[in-house]
Image: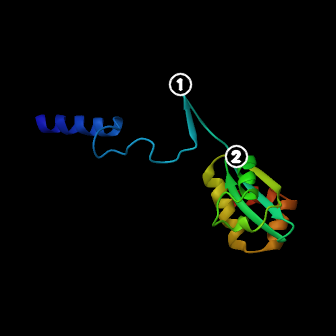
Amino acid sequence: MKKNGALAQLVEQWTENPCVPGSIPGGTTKNPNKLFGFFIYKTMHYLYIIYSKSLNKYYVGESHDVKKRLEQHKNHHYKSNFSRRASDWELLLQKQLENREQALYLEKFIKRMKSKKFTEKVINDPKILDNILNKK
């Protein structure tokens, strides 16, 4: 009996105390959720499509801060990124979504299509994205 109580206490410490060895240390995962006081709110995520006239190419991405991300594309913030090839990126579509998972799903869906025509259809009719999510 005493062993079971000690085990339960260890499990409780492990699940509630991040300082206990073997538990997941705080700050090791990126979580777009913000904690203020006792309230947790989720930050919105966005799917975006940008276009470079000089390359005549589209770039599909996701971010919680599209304005900042667009500046990073224009200023070649990520040196190994495809978008480093141009500086004239302009935002053509910004779709607000409930969470990052939805944004990533749509980003991958569009990229898997490997179709400039499909990307242009999405830009001209963003409701296509809602239909894709509803069929998920």
Q: Which residue is mark 1?
A: 37
Indicate how the structure is coloured in the image.
rainbow
| Occupied quadrant, residue 133 | bottom right
Q: Amino acid at mark 1?
A: Gly
Q: Residue at x 68, y 55 (%)?
A: 62
| Occupied quadrant, residue 75 | bottom right
Quadrant, the N terminus: top left
Tell me the distance, in whole angstroms, between the alpha carbons under discs 2 and 1.
Answer: 23 Å
Q: Which mark is residue 101?
A: none
Q: Position of residue 18 (x, y in %)?
A: 35, 38
Seen as rendered, the residue at the extreme top is 37
Quadrant, the C terminus: bottom right
| Label 1 element class | loop
Left or right for 66, reference 51: left
Q: Residue at x 16, y 38 (%)?
A: 4
Q: Using a 10 Å C-alpha cutoff, classify the residue at mark 2 as few (fewer than 14 neighbours), some (14 to 19) or many (20 or more).
A: few
Q: Position of residue 128 (x, y in %)?
A: 79, 60
Q: Amino acid at mark 2?
A: Asp
Q: Relative to 39, say whether 136 is above or below.
A: below
Q: Is residue 80 visible?
A: yes
Q: Residue at x 11, y 34 (%)?
A: 2
Q: Position of residue 22 (x, y in %)?
A: 29, 46
Contact between labelled residues 1 and 2, with CB atoms less than 8 Å apart: no
Look at discs 2 and 1 and give the one toward the viewer: 2
Q: Which residue is mark 2?
A: 65
Q: Using a 10 Å C-alpha cutoff, classify the residue at mark 1 as few (fewer than 14 neighbours), some (14 to 19) or many (20 or more).
A: few
Seen as rendered, the residue at the extreme bottom is 114
Q: Relative to 46, say whether 56 is above or below.
A: below
Q: Nearer the viewer, residue 124 or 1?
A: 124
Q: Earlier in the sequence, mark 2 or mark 1?
A: 1
